[in-house]
Structures are given as C-alpha cells and as structure tokens.
Image (cartoon, helix red, strand yellow):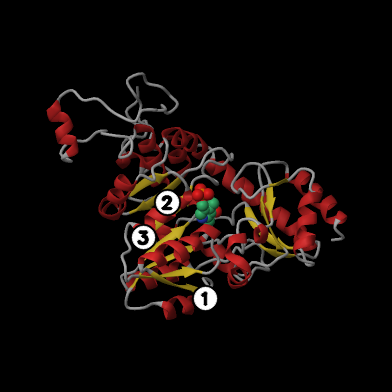
Amino acid sequence: MKKTTGSDPSVTAKWRPATQAVRAGTARSQFGETSEALFLTSGYSYDSAEEVAARFAGEAEGMQYSRFKNPTVEMLQHRIAAMEAAEACLAQASGMAAMTSALLCMLSAGDHVVAGRAAFGSCRWILDNVLNRFGITHTVVDGTDNAAWEAAVQPNTKAFFFETPANPTMDLVDLEFVCSLARSKGITTVVDNAFATSVLQKPIDFGADVVAYSATKLMDGQGRVMAGAVCASKQWIEEKLSPFQRNTGPICAPFNAWVVLKGLETLSLRAPAQSASALQVAQFLEERGLRVLHPGLPSHPQHELCQRQMVAAGPIFSFIAPKGQEQAMALCNALELIDISNNIGDSKSLMCHPASTTHYNMGVEGRAEAGIEDGMLRINVGLEDVADLIEDLDQALGKVGL
Ligand SMILES: *Cc1c(COP(=O)(O)O)cnc(C)c1O
C-alpha cells in the first residue's frame, strides 16, 4: 500500500488541484481499499483507560466520538482544506450550518457585522433573526461598492460577511479590496464561496480569513446530499470553530461526507465544463435581447473584476423576463428538458424564480434592497449537451413571446 495516499498534508499541499480533488485526505485502513471507506460509527473503542484519558486530555491523537471527529469526515475536511490551500477545515451538516457556525463561534453581544446586500435568503435571515436577538447588529451594503464597505465600518465591527458571486444577482465583491480593508482594521472576512468553489475562485489568495461553503451545491455536484464546510487558519479553527462545533453539534454525517468526497473527485472537470456551457447559454439569451446577469459576459459591469479574481464565472446566472413574475413563471412552465428546481450546482440543468422561492421570505422590501426583480430567473447550467439546453430555452421563450 502506497504511503502517499493523501493522508499527509505536507505531501498533498504540493499536489496540483486536480490531484488534490481525487486523492487529498484519503486515509486507507488496514485493508488498502482504493475508494475512501465509509465509517458509519458514532463511537470508538480504546486499548486502555489511559489511552482514552489521553485523548480526552488532548494529549493523544485519535477518535473519541463522531460529534468531534470521524475518519470519513476527516478525509473530506483534509481534501477541502488542501484544495482551498487553507490550513484547516471543518465540515458541517449543511451550508447554513456552516454559515451559522462561522458567525456564532466568533461574535458576541455588542459586535457589528457588515454584510453584502445580495445574499442567499437564509444568510440574510441569520443576520436579521438570529444575530439580532443576541445583540449583534449589522449593516447591509451594496457589495459591489468598495466605498460602501469602508463607510459601514464601526469601531465594533468584527466581521465582513458576503457571497461572491452573490445569489441570485451575480453581483461580485472585490475580494482584494474588501479583504485588505478588513485586514487593516482587524475585521474577520467570511466569504461564502458556494457559487464558485476553490476550482473557480480562491478567496484566501486575496486575503480572506474564513471561506464557508454549502457543499450541497457544486462540491457534491449531483444533487444528492446536504453538507457544508468552513475553511480558515489552524488557529481560528482550533480556538473559535472547533469548540463551538464540538459542543453544539452541527456536524456533517459520515455518509454525506463520503458522497461529497466522491463528488470532489470530478469537481475540476465539472466546474469548468458547466461554466463554459453557462456562458454559451448566457450569450444565447443576450443575443435574444434579454437582460442577462452573468459576470463572464463583456456586457456585465463587473466583467473585468470577474476576470481578475475568477478562473471562470461558474454554472449559475440570472436573466430577466421583462414582463415580470407571470412571464417568468410561464417560461419555467414551458421548459421541457430543464427542470424547475431551486437547487444549484447539480449536473442537471435547473431553473427557478427566486422572488417566489429562495428569496420569498425576504419580502418585497428585502428583495428590492437586494436587487431581486420580479421577473428574475436563475439558471444552473448542468452537464447536458449545451445545444439541447439552448433548444429547450429557444422553444420555451417562443411560447412566452420572447
Ligand atoms: C445553498 C446556499 C447556501 C445554503 O446551503 P445549504 O447547503 O442549502 O444549507 C448558502 N449560501 C449560498 C450562496 C448557497 O447557494
């Protein structure tokens, strides 16, 4: 059995991303299995009472209980950290468990957060309905406006929290500017990188402190399991997130971790392929005369920033049905191949109407503030032949008079 299966971080850190995606983290059992083993166990047994005492005292390495550590989950954490070029990673039960934990583990009453206004509905909900209840205030800014970040900083600002690209407006945040502003003021940046993944964008390279994920999306890539991950420095993970997570329990199930490990093996092929198809679909819609929000298009106001900080713009983008919600819904209903679904990152192409689904709970005012129009449609472009997707959109647009 080869030693370099992937369990040594000093080895995996030197591998190129595609190799990390397939092998980093793999820790083989005594059987030498090629595919990562699925350890469905909550507990562990020990050779002696002294051994278990040493592990609880933090003096010996090893497993104690799967709320703390599980071998399959550890393989996933190692793989994600290697791909992200992060010192450490902890996996969670879902993307929202990851976002909630990343914020709650480090914030206290009296602290202040600055957040991008365009965000996944539940990310806004945490700020408005959880953090607020515990005396943690926030200011929402137009994430595309560098000066707005600077102006929103207060003496008690402890975190910047944003997505880039943001869901579903595809607004980008200037990672280099915003992360260095945060650094200069001792503020921790938490970047939700679900729309890109490390294959398309590495926020840590631009100075981000914490990179949080819904692994449900592109990492799984086939729409199977819920999972999340938080990457950061070893010190932040050990001092802030790990004690919070061990004691509150938003952990990733071993089965889900195993599925995501398998998903990651193909991520470096899927993400660029889906991005290329998405750009083609976006070009088709733009040529058809529709307003398209896709930072990979030269018409997008942040196209230059996209080229600076992203390898490709990803599989997801939005466009506007000019006559509003009724026309947007009719377009969804007219699709024959592309599914109506609010999920993203899947290898199947999916479309949804954010104002009535993912961002419904924000209310009319919240949506107006976040730039979510009634006619907006969000599409996740999958791995089907792009010609079939364009044909489907072509016939559906025809049916709604577009
Ligand atoms: C889906 C998503 C989340 C939430 O992740 P879950 O795995 O569904 O809990 C958070 N942020 C973004 C940008 C997302 O797309």
Q: Residue, x 48% and y 41% (percent of image)? A: 18
Instruction: Please tell me whether residue 140 is drawn above or below residue 94 in the rendered image.
Output: below
Residue for badge 1: 145
User: Of tags 3 and 2, which is closer to the observer?
Assistant: 2
Disc 3/disc 2 C-alpha distance (Å): 15 Å
The CA span between labels 2 and 1 is 26 Å
Q: Nearer the viewer, residue 227 or 362?
A: 362
Give the secondary structure at mark 2. Answer: helix
Image quarter (top left, top right, bottom left or bottom right) of the C terminus: bottom right
User: Would you call the spot at circle 3 few (<14 residues within 10 Å), some (14-19), or many (20 or more)?
Assistant: many
Comes first in the chain, label 3 or label 1:
1
For residue 217, side relative to residue 296 (left or right) = left
Which label's residue is closer to the chain start, 3 or 2? Answer: 2
Label 3 sits on residue? 209
Spot occupied by residue 204 in the image (x, y as percentages of width and height): 40, 58
Image coordinates of residue 230 in percent, x first then y, are 39, 51
Q: Is mark 2 within 8 Å of ligand 1?
A: yes
Asked whether 186 or 43 is in front, the reply is 43
Position of residue 230 in the picture relative to residue 393 (left or right): left
Q: Residue at x 40, y 65 (%)?
A: 133
Instruction: Give the CA separation, mark 3 to mark 1.
Output: 20 Å
Question: Looking at the image, can residue 194 be seen?
Answer: no
The image shows residue 23, relative to residue 34, as above or below, that is: below
What's the amino acid at mark 2?
Answer: Ala
Q: On the rendered structure, is 185 left or right of 377?
A: left
Instruction: Name the residue located 75 percent from the left edge and 63 percent from the top edge.
Output: 325
| Residue 245 picture location, percent across and down | 33, 48
Q: Nearer the viewer, residue 163 or 54?
A: 54
Q: Residues within 10 Å of mark 1 (few under 14, many from 20)?
A: some
Residue that badge 2 annotates: 98
